[in-house]
Amino acid sequence: MIDAGSVETALRSALSQGLIRQEDTAAIFYDLSFLASRIKYLTSCFPPATLHGLAIKANPLTRIMELMRGFAPNIGVEAASIGEVTMALRSGYQPDHIVYDSPVKTFSDLEFALKTGIHINIDNLSELDRVNKITMAGSCTMSGSAGLRINPQIGLGTILESSVAGEYSKFGVPINFFREELEKAYLTHPWLTGVHLHVGSQGCPMHMLTDGIGVLYDFVADMNRKRGRIGFPSISVFDIGGGLPISYQSATSPPSMDEYVRKIAERAPMLFDPASFKLITEFGRWIYTNAGWTVSRVEYVKRDPAINTAMIHVGADLFVRECLNPRDWRHEYSLFDQWGRLKEGTDDHPYNLAGPLCFSGDIVAKNVLLPRVEEGDYIVIHDTGGYTFSMWSRYNSRQTPRIVGYRADRFEILKERETLEELQGFWR
Ligand code: LLP
């Protein structure tokens, strides 16, 4: 997490260098050195041949995708749609560094993916039939590699909307219900050399993630014995998905990546034998979220008898889940004056941080203790580097904010504030 002191340093330089103009009522910042160190640490935890497919859905900014690729040779992406696959190809990712994971791939999506040579994670047995049909028809061959997504059915985490390994899930093939069908799939398709799982995103403790990996590890060991007997190549691509939780609160410490890797190695040691397996990871939140923060100017302050409301320039357009599901999603907030100086103390009454959108649920956070807020101050919402701008909502047609990267006091505009013409273009 980037603390208020470090944000203050960056915010003051950004203001003095004119990066937050009058029209930049809000802006999003990324500490690029933080991202580089994240990648360095991640790649040091796993075997060197691991492909780290960073989840594009967490942060699809083209410039960030280009930068991430430069931080280490084994950085790839996990794409949730053909749109994301295309963006990855255009940002310079090699096909064998792209992992394609949509649960609703059409025939033409599959044909495109097969021709391009990316790694496809097949979501279900009907999709497997389609891939078979396409390759049998001879219109294209399997130029990349493929795995099958299996739901290990090890249970739900604390956040239902992002838990996908319960008894029921819309993703993957549930192993307890379809064990026989899964065996048949692996014993009739020699080219099916991968497995894929993803347990959930945030809200799933580390032991759930390793339990899920363990279920698939045992299944793969069994399948590889049987495939060996019939002369099929072993299942050798093991995609563990993403999901390592992070902390949105500075007082709580999240599990560390090296501890996670140690736990995986205890449960599934052969995964770390490079002659037997190639690992794929698909982290998103752990990579990006703590690296970014959002700043909004306070336009007005309303003072009711027991509660204050700071009217700010980002609401449910940028913070969809914080507004709609505040129980599960809460950030930390800091207050700065118009020159970017950190304000200290606590006002007599707490604050609601209310967005600009036209519905009463457009409140980013309720009852936040803050120093006294004045018009023209800056509110910073911490830990917004992942699953925030990527979930932007067009409701009320607000212009998307300027997005800025920095290394110490050197700034780079990653994406310009949306113009009114571009905004109109969306609806045209
Ligand atoms: N792989 C697959 C197949 C996924 O579905 C996801 C996240 C990831 C990897 C990355 O998981 P991570 O490491 O970021 O936890 N809209 C939600 C986030 C949903 C995440 C969906 N899938 C939110 O409000 O934050």
Image (cartoon, grey):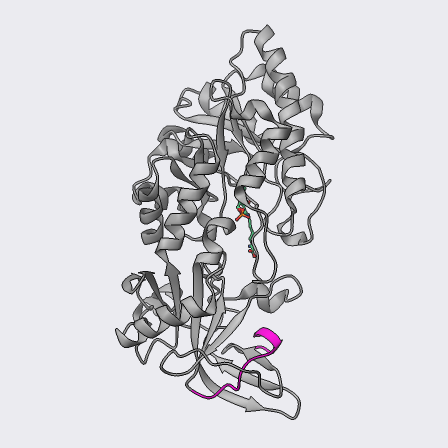
The answer to whether 205 is drawn above or below residue 370 in the figure is above
Residue 50 vs 84, above or below: the answer is above
Magenta part, dominant SS: loop
Q: Is residue 212 left or right of residue 414?
A: right
Q: Position of residue 342 (x, y in %)?
A: 44, 78
Indicate whether 397 appears above or below 249: below
Q: Is residue 361 visible?
A: no
Question: Where on the picture, by quarter, is residue 86?
Answer: top left
Q: Position of residue 94 (x, y in %)?
A: 33, 35
- Can you say whether 98 is above or below 190 in the image? below
Residue drawn at x 47%, y 63% as measured from the top left: 392
- The answer to which quarter of the image holds residue 252 is bottom right
Tell me the residue at 53%/86% (across/down): 372
Q: What residue lies at 29% left-to-right and 41% top-to-bottom?
A: 92
Q: Which residues are magenta?
A: 359-375
Query: Could you tell me which residue is drawn at 61 percent across and 21 percent down?
Result: 185
Q: Is residue 319 left or right of residue 74?
A: right
Q: Is residue 341 left or right of residue 133?
A: left
> Which one is nearer the viewer's eye here, 99 or 75?
75
Residue 232 x/y as whole percent: 53, 11
User: Is residue 372 located in the magenta-colored stretch of the structure?
Assistant: yes
168 or 295, nearer to the observer: 295
Screen quadrant of the C terminus: bottom left
Q: Is residue 13 left or right of residue 199?
A: left
